[in-house]
Every structure is written in C-alpha cells, then in structure tokens.
Amino acid sequence: MERIPESGWYYANKFTRIALEAYAEIMGKNGLNAILNLAGLGRFIDNYPPDNLERGFDFSDFSSIHIALEEMYGPRGGRGFALRAGRATFNDALRNFGALAGVGDLAFKVLPLQAKLRIGLPAMARIFSQVSDQHSTAEEKENEFVYTIHRCPVCWGRKGADKPVCYIATGLLHASLTWVSGGMEFRVNESKCVAVGDEVCEFVIQKEPIT
C-alpha cells in the first residue's frame, strides 16, 4: 500500500482511540491488527493513542487506516465497517460533549426538531474545529443542511476515487443526528469528497427525518 506523506494536521487522540476500539469490536482484534499492519501502522497494535484530547494523530495515518480497510474488505465491506465505527465513535465519545456544545440540557431537549438541528449541527462542527485540525462548518438551506469538512482526516492524501469515501464521517453524522433529535434517523449523503477531486468533503442532510 502506498504511503501518504505526513500532513502536519492532527486528529484528537481520544477520537482516534475510540475509532480503533470500535473497529476492534466490529471486526475483531486480529482484523484490526491486519488493517494497521497493511497501513504501515503496526506501532499502534495494542498501543492505541492516549485517552486525551491532544492533537496527536496525523491525518495521513487516519486516512491510511481507511484505505487499508477498503483494500482488505473491498469498498462495500469497508464502507459497512466504517459507517458502524462512525456511529460508535459518536456514541462513545461525542455525546459527552453535549453539555460543552450547549445541546445536553433540558432547555435543548424541549425545542422543536428543526431548532435542535439548527443548533446541534453547528455545535458539532465547532467541537471538531476546536479539538482537532479538522475544520468543519454547517449551513442551513431551504430543505437541507450542508455539513462541510474543509480539512478532512478521513480521505487526506487520497486521489482518484470514483465516489466519496468518508464513510466513518457519514456514520458519525448519522449518530449525532439520532442523538440530537431524540432517536430519529436522517438521510446523510456525501455529495463532495476531496478523494474524488472536490475542494471539500460535503454532506447533505435532509431536514425531514426518515423515521
């Protein structure tokens, strides 16, 4: 597997650790170890990043994990694992940031659905921008929200993909929307991706829930 040069941009150690723990749970420890070896990251076998919010995990390494995942399990299998790991990452780590983002208190819980989304999505974008070098924004349109990752760790250094590949980010958004809305599911579609040749990774979220 071709090595991606170091980016000098970093993901929070805690987020990476939880993502790796999620992959270990989903595919088994041996499966994760094989992925790390294929990605040239054997040093992280049984040696996950520390449980802190320091920016310590290079985007190139995070991207390499997801390239290795697709190489080993195929695009479809890799997609399924990454979506599940994204949900687990939110459920294990980011729901604890609810209070920090102002979306965990009772006043928030009694708001109408659209108001929750209007507050919750930008709050999530701010958290990522604050605790990692992943710069994210959220914007409201008439029928949808657009969540944009302007500097994306998931596909850093990737080129020539035939479709968007940031599945772990899609899974994370799915879980965050379910949590913010109190249990509803929403359509999340990655409409732009740096790996395809776009300037940003962009996710379109329909305002009306599926369920």
Image: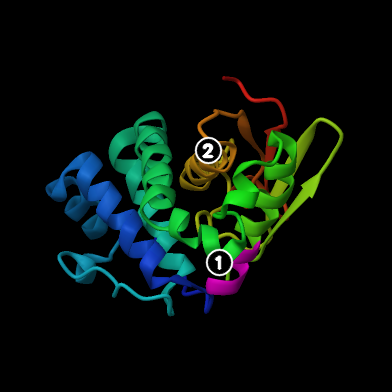
Residue for point 19% across, 70% down? 47
Dot 1 and dot 2 residues touching (CB under 8 Å): no
Q: Is residue 142 above or below residue 20?
A: above
Q: Is 46 in front, or is 54?
A: 54
Q: Residue at x 44, y 71 (%)?
A: 12
> On the rendered image, what quadrant is the N terminus found in?
bottom left
Name the residue tied to disc 2.
174
Q: Quadrant of residue 83?
A: top left
Residue linked to disc 1? 100
Residue 133 image-quadrant placement: bottom right
Relative image position of residue 107 (x, y in whole percent): 64, 51
Q: Residues within 10 Å of mark 1 (few under 14, many from 20)?
A: few
Residue 26 magenta: no
- Left or right, 1 with respect to 110, comes to left
- Numbered range of the magenta stretch: 126-131
Query: Circle 1 sits in a helix, a strand or a loop, which is it?
Result: helix
